[in-house]
Image (cartoon, grey):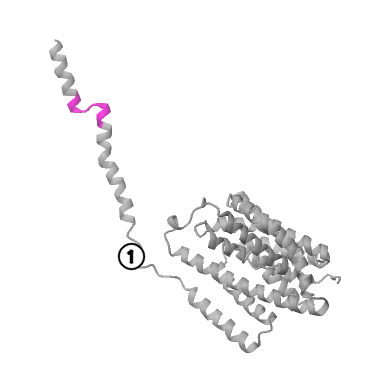
Amino acid sequence: MSMDFSWSMVAAGALVGCMVGLTGMGGGALMTPLMVTVFGVNPTQAIGSDLATSVLMKPFGAAVHQKAGTVRWDVVRWLLPTGVPAAFCGAFLLQFLGEGEELQSRVKIVIGAALLLAVTGMLARMWLDRRRAGRDGTAAEDAHVPVRPGATLLIGLVGGLVVGMTSVGSGSLIIVMLMLVHPRLKANHLVGTDLVQAIPIVAAAAAGHFIVGDASLGLAAVLLLGAIPGVLVGAVLSTRAPGGVLRWVLAIILLATGLSLVHVPEAVIVPATALLAGYAVVSSRPRRPRPGTEPAEPAETAEPAETAETAPEAVGEPTGGPTADGIGRASARRQV
């Protein structure tokens, strides 16, 4: 399928890129269903083209985190041995779902299931972030948490397979699984590590789809015209925009789209999204501090007083005070 230039497609790429820059998630989870449901692109081609777009879009965010030193390369090294081959094989596994219209219909269901899984992952991530915020930050987070090789290899296998088959999950599923396996790892290190590991995994998945013939370079180029400036603008706005609210909006959109792709009737979709929106409003309210969480500061302010009391003793001994002078005069009289 050849893809003619379309400003609406460029705008869609910019919208998705901006959402990725603002929230760190939503690339494949938003781009692929948008191409399928709005622009009528075949599901398999939408997956391959989205992966090709992501290969060139992910490094922008990864470079920022690499410069800031918030990438755990040891975690990345344990994700890739299983994640890269699983993502590459995902494109070929799609061929076992059938041919022609039967294949496209089944792939839609697979994408819808992946979107619902992504929504579950996003909700889990927001819950974990909220739970972390309620703890003492110094005790809860650590940049040097030891990696768990076996569990991390399993995350790469599952996440890579989902990415290769649906293009969904590199920014919404894998990071949640990393949070569950390494719950004390600092949040910015989680995001930086997830962005870096996504580059080779997404590239392997895109290569598989190119070999199968699903990806369209023309479609990917049109999307990139909007996606690259969009992700840069989103990254700039991320310091000012309410990221939590945007994540809830994204979760609601993905829930409705996922339910639609798995052929859930509108009578269920509407109340389900309304219920999630209501929960978002309630949970987004700022928490009031608990009554017993603040009195830790007096102990810290007492430390300077203790050091002030002990300082004269430490200084007085080596320099010699009145007692030392008296002993010196007495010894001088004896010598005379």
Relative to 229, residue 305 above or below: above
Residue type (three-letter) at the residue carrying disc 1: Gly
For the N terminus, the image quarter is bottom right
Residue drawn at point x = 67 percent, y = 55 percent: 80
Residue that extends furthest to the top in the rendered view of this protein: 336
Image-based side of 191 in relation to 1, left or right: left
Q: Is 59 displayed left or right of 333 in the figure?
A: right
Residue 207 quadrant: bottom right
The region drawn magenta spans 316-324
Can residue 85 be seen here?
yes
**Image quarter for residue 170?**
bottom right
**x, y percent for residue 288:** 40, 70
Crowding at mark 1 (Cα within 10 Å: few <14, some 14-19, many 20+): few
Q: On the image, numbered disc 1 is attached to which residue? A: 292
Asked if residue 317 is among those painted magenta in the image, a careful observer would answer yes
Instruction: Indicate whether 261 appears above or below 205.
Output: below
Q: Under tag 1, what secondary structure?
A: loop
